Amino acid sequence: MTLNRTIALLTMRLLLGFIFLMQGYGKVFHWGIDNVYKNFFQGTYRELLPDFLIQFTAYYTSFVELIAGFLLIIGLKIDWALYALASVLIVVTFGHGLAEPIWDLSHVMFRGILLLGILLLPKSWDRFSLDAFLANKK
């Protein structure tokens, strides 16, 4: 049973990490954040929010997804990565709701459930992480 808990938490962390890492990677390296900002963020929110806020949000969400997703995969600073990703999910939920009052929440809900699950489960179950390795070394 102990191994099942460890593998379950590792799977949750890796799933969430890869989902966010690949999304951030696509925004930063494939499309380019300026392109994402101009074609997705600015076009959708130009009439609703000030431009500086739209631009900040495009950069913030892209880099947080990339960096925090990577941190989750390697298991380093897991709590801080989850807090940052929670802020992204809140921003995304607000932004999509602002642009379109009724929208598909399935991708946000799936990520939110994984994120909350990882936050709520005991850290002792997450044995395959750099955080656990560094804690055991002390």
Image (cartoon, rainbow, N blue to C red):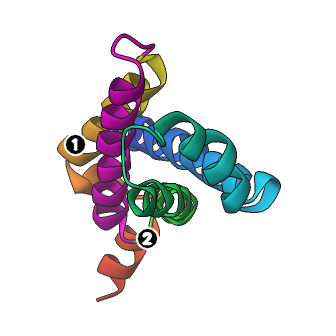
The relative height of residue 10 versus residue 70 in the rendered view (above or below) is: above
Amino acid of disc 2: Leu
In the displayed structure image, the side of residue 42 where residue 83 appears, left or right: left
- What amino acid type is highlighted by mark number 1? Leu
Q: Is residue 29 left or right of residue 107?
A: right
The picture places residue 90, in percent across and down from the top left corner, at 29, 41
Q: Which residue is mark 1?
A: 121
Q: Whole-percent x and y of residue 46?
A: 48, 43
Residue pictured at 22% horizontal, 42% vertical: 121
Question: In this rendering, is residue 83 above or below 115?
Answer: below
Q: Camera-side residue: 80 or 2?
A: 80
At 45% from the left and 53% from the top, the residue drawn is: 54
On screen, residue 130 above or below 56: below
Quadrant the C terminus occupies: bottom left
x and y, in percent, of residue 124 in the image:
25, 56
Is 97 a magenta residue?
yes
Instruction: Residue 1 in the image: state x and y as whole percent.
Output: 33, 32
Along the viewing direction, whichever of 7 and 41 lies nearer the viewer: 41
* Numbered range of the magenta stretch: 77-104
List the residue tagged with mark 2: 76
Is residue 1 among the parts visible in the rendering?
no
Mark 1 is surrounded, within 10 Å at the Cα level, by few (under 14), some (14 to 19) or many (20 or more) other residues, namely few
Answer yes or no: is residue 15 visible. Answer: yes
